Amino acid sequence: MLRPILLSLALATVHGPTCAAPRLQTLMKGLHGGGSCRAVQVLDSLALISNGPYLRVLDCSDETSPRSIGLLKMPDEILDIQVADQIAWLAHSYEGISAVSLADPRHPVILRTSRSWGQANALILRDEYLYVADGLSGLRIVPWEGLLERRTQGWFWNTPGNAVSLALEGSRAYVADSGGGVQLLDIQDPSNITLIAGLLDSLSIARVAVKDSILYAVETRNPSRTHVTLHVLDVRDPDTPHELDIRSVFSDTDGNLALQNNTLYLASGWGGLSMLDISDPAEIPYQSHFSDPDGCVDVSPKSYLAYLACGKSGFRIADLILPGYEFVAGRYSTPVEPMKIVQRDGLAWVADRHEGLTLFDVRDPLDPRELSWINLTDGIVDFAVTDSFLYALSGGRSLRIYTNDTPGVNEQTGYFQYGTNILSLAVTGDLVCLLSRNALRFLDTSDQLHPLEIGLWSTTLDLKYMAVEDSLAYLVSATKGVLVVDFHDPRTPIPVGGWCPDIGELAPIDVRGNTAYVMSSPHTLNILDVSDPGAITLLSATDSLSMRGRIHPADSVLFYQCIFSGYGALDIRDPEHPVPLGETEPGRRWTVDLAVEGKTITSIESGVGLVIDEWAILDVADPEDPEDPETPQQFTLPRNDPNPFNAGTRISWTLPVSSRVELTVFDLGGRRVRHQDLGRMVQGQHEYRLVADDLPSGVLFYRIVTEQETHWGKMLHLK
């Protein structure tokens, strides 16, 4: 027989008897977004971008549709990227420098990482050396082969303040210092760096670039918040530098500099990309400006295209072939302030409070793709999706209806304006239910061009949340519990029951069949029997300090947001005795919302983006149970022994029938690190010897796939 494993929720208690339960297991399969995009670098048809702590590889062979093909989690946010010989070199602040192999861009691999001496703000790779603007530690020159040992070839620490940027030309290094100008250094002998001159000593410099001994330096101070001061110096004779030009440029100090041919690119966190013609450094005309409301913080030019890191909103490819007529050729975006997600048939709609609705194709979780974007400039409050239409509450006072027959093609077909704020909506057939603080309205949308309000139920109660099931609306009041309104005839809706416990303020509600799930303060999940709306009864109440916010019942499992990070789950097969299953692994960010479809959980993580997990309920066989039959009746959970392991471990499982079997091992980030086709195996017990070899250390997941089902296990590799 099977012995389920119980993994309790932190500080969770259940009112009523508890029972043994299986364990929830999740594995990250894909991620879209990843956080603020701070850096970008181009390698052939690939673009490498930073998404917070993630390095993302984008295939830009079709510049109109960049797509993610590789993802790797790094120790900290990535501030700068350099690429050479299929190796990406990353600067990530106090966590130092990393080298990442791009031999297989779909599976980037960390080759080595070294903690920083100071704060790795920027780097340049030239020959066998890394040149690092290392914050308070000045300029470091590191042989890349000695990176792991933190071996330094040269060090110039006597910069006035904080080394934030650098440029190289010939035997000279130009180090921008936010505390005092630009340090011009002789690096002919990397082991003996000497100061040639201090330039612009009294100024705070954020960025530098150099071409033909002409220095371009961005000063951090400017009377205008939307402009910076650009200094152009002739430093062919460093003893007598000659200032050629000083000008105010539409940019800010958050943006980087780049040079290509005779064009200087200034990325602006305020609003896009400025381009200056530097063919004559003494007379620099303003060439053009590519406007982006989300701003740019880094730029990598290539021919007539500019690859842009645009902070919170992600990645852009700008077509600059016609100055003055620049346009976005392609984009890879991250919602700025996501608030809700809905998933159907492998498509996920994400609502951003300020940016509108974005549709993602998540059918391949390893490569989630943005399909379309609906720009709602007055914001979005709530939305709902059906097979044919998409309904969006825009600004809380207007309902917009879009076609939804073809994924990625949404044309507005209907519009309805209200004079009051609408909090949420629900759709059943052609009927749209609209909830405001003191009313429930019913809108007939059978004629999409002319939606018509046909019913109204008013109340003096302060309504907050709504769920709809079988022509019944379950409304949550701030102080009066749950009210049930029958709208079988939406022209004359009538209240038919409710549930008003003295347990504090209630939160979002969800109803499935004859069971309702509603949160109450501070952290309690209430499961209700609503088979008779006039006599609603409480089946169970589960308290957990980690529970909060929205709840998502899915078959026999209910998922909930955790108050600190990630999400958790309850086994609700017996609604009178729900059992905690566990929570996501530590280190996850706060989950804004999630959607469950089949064995896939698509969630929005704060500061990260769209995260796609595969989930399973794990059971293990009890080898000491005398009742275990000799002939297996069902697949038993794969186990590995020893666990944790060092050199290797044995994975064992039992097959109820003969089947082909595949074994795959994943790391904590969802990257495949080992795959083995084991061929056809007969019914009975089996064992596979997994040799550690090149397996990464830490938590690993293994998946066994048969012709009938898929099962997961977790192990810990200690090097």
Image (tube, rainbow, N blue to C red):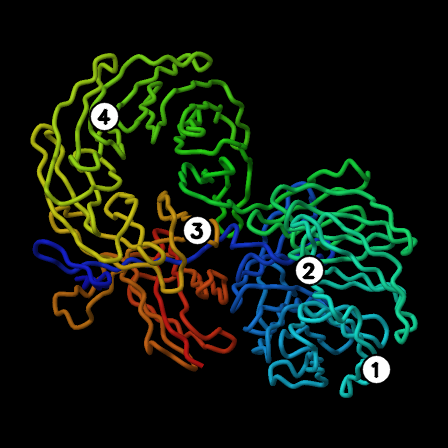
Q: Does label 3 or label 1 sit earlier along the sequence?
A: 1
Three-letter code for the amino acid on which mark 3 is drawn? Ile
The image quadrant where one finds the N terminus is bottom left
Element class at badge 2: loop
Q: Which residue is mark 3?
A: 612
Q: Which residue is mark 2?
A: 220
Measured Cα–Cα span from mark 3 to mark 4: 31 Å
The correct choice, above or below, for 708 with respect to 320 in the image is below
Q: Residues within 10 Å of mark 3 (few under 14, many from 20)?
A: many
Measured Cα–Cα span from mark 3 to mark 1: 50 Å
Element class at badge 1: loop
Element class at badge 4: loop
Measured Cα–Cα span from mark 4 to mark 1: 79 Å
Q: Does label 2 or label 3 sit earlier along the sequence?
A: 2
Q: Residues within 10 Å of mark 1 (few under 14, many from 20)?
A: few
In terms of depth relative to the viewer, which is nearer, 629 or 96? 96
Q: Which residue is mark 1?
A: 188
Q: Residues within 10 Å of mark 2 (few under 14, many from 20)?
A: some
Residue at 65% from the left image edge and 65% from the top image edge: 103
Element class at badge 3: strand
Residue at 55% from the left image edge and 50% from the top image edge: 312
Left or right position of 379 against 527: right
Three-letter code for the amino acid on which mark 2 is drawn? Thr
**What is the quadrant of residue 108 in the picture?**
bottom right
Question: Which of label 4 and label 1 is nearer to you?
Answer: 1
**What is the quadrant of residue 581 in the picture?**
bottom left
Measured Cα–Cα span from mark 2 to mark 3: 40 Å
Question: Which of label 2 and label 4 is nearer to you?
Answer: 2
Three-letter code for the amino acid on which mark 1 is drawn? Gln
Residue at 17% from the left image edge and 18% from the top image edge: 494
Instruction: Find residue 211 and report its horizontal and vertical position in percent.
Output: 86, 63
